[in-house]
């Protein structure tokens, strides 16, 4: 009987694992939960604030990562191209400032002002939003598409911005722009997921 109990427990765990997906963040097609985070101007921002958007380009980024800095102008360009088409950029800094010098809220304010960000730059103080989304890198990008007329958003693309994290002039495949062309045409992105390339998020120590 004693040997039977561990065996039954293992069987139960195996059955449950086939029904319960690990908490590894969103997959394409999932519903994205809203959030309310503080912007560099001190105001709270959520996805529900703007009722006119068709969706959002949510990008987890930061101040000091060389990859995030290399993509900075490209993130700005995405906002300039797609905000007028209903898909503005929302940038989120998930790094714990205690684990990464230069990632404080004050440093975020300075960065946003110096680079003249045309989009919100939000601080994920608890890192809960990054964990919910499954972000692991900076930058790590998610395209969200509004469902109907309410405030429900579906994840339509996850991953990298393009195929060259170092030199924008050497880019051959613009993953996000290609996905956006199809999404704006009412079609699913044919390449809906790519591997995010960047610095690992600096998680708070337990």
Image: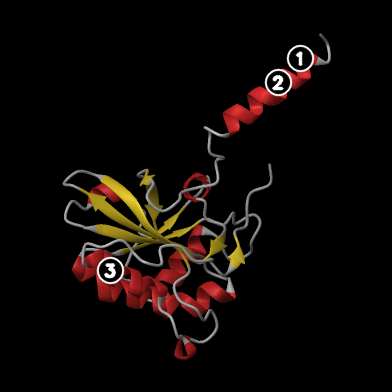
Q: CA distance from mark 1 to mark 2?
A: 6 Å
Q: Which residue is mark 3?
A: 182
Q: Secondary structure at mark 1?
A: helix
Label for residue 5?
1
Q: Against 31, is 56 above or below?
A: below
Percent across and percent down for residue 193 are: 45, 62
Q: Between disc 3 and disc 1, whose residue precedes?
A: 1
Percent across and percent down for residue 173 are: 43, 81
Label for residue 162?
none
Q: CA distance from mark 2 to mark 3?
A: 47 Å
Which residue is pictured at 55% across the width and 46% down the height?
Answer: 24
Q: Between disc 2 and disc 3, whose residue precedes?
A: 2
Q: Which residue is mark 2?
A: 9
Label 2 neighbour load within 10 Å: few <14, some 14-19, many 20+: few
Q: Is residue 106 left or right of residue 183?
A: right
Q: Nearer the viewer, residue 202 or 166?
A: 166
Percent across and percent down for residue 98 are: 64, 54
Q: CA distance from mark 3 to mark 1?
A: 53 Å
């Amino acid at each position: 009987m004693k040997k039977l109990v561990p065996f039954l427990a293992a069987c139960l765990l195996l059955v449950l694992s086939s029904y319960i997906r690990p908490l590894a963040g969103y997959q394409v097609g999932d519903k994205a939960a809203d959030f309310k985070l503080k912007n560099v101007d001190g105001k709270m921002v959520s996805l529900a604030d703007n009722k006119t958007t068709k969706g959002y380009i949510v990008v987890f980024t930061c101040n000091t990562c060389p990859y995030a800095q290399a993509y900075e102008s490209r993130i700005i360009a995405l906002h300039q191209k797609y905000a007028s088409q209903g898909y503005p950029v929302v940038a989120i800094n998930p790094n714990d400032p205690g684990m990464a010098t230069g990632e404080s809220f004050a440093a975020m304010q300075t960065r946003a002002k110096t680079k003249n960000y045309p989009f919100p730059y939000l601080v994920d103080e608890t890192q809960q939003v990054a964990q919910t989304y499954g972000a692991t890198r900076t930058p790590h990008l998610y395209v969200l598409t509004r469902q109907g007329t309410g405030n429900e958003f579906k994840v339509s693309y996850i991953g990298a911005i393009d195929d060259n994290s170092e030199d924008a002039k050497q880019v051959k495949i613009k993953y996000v722009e290609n996905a956006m062309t199809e999404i704006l045409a009412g079609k699913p992105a044919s390449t809906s997921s790519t591997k995010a390339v960047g610095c690992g998020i600096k998680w708070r120590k337990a």
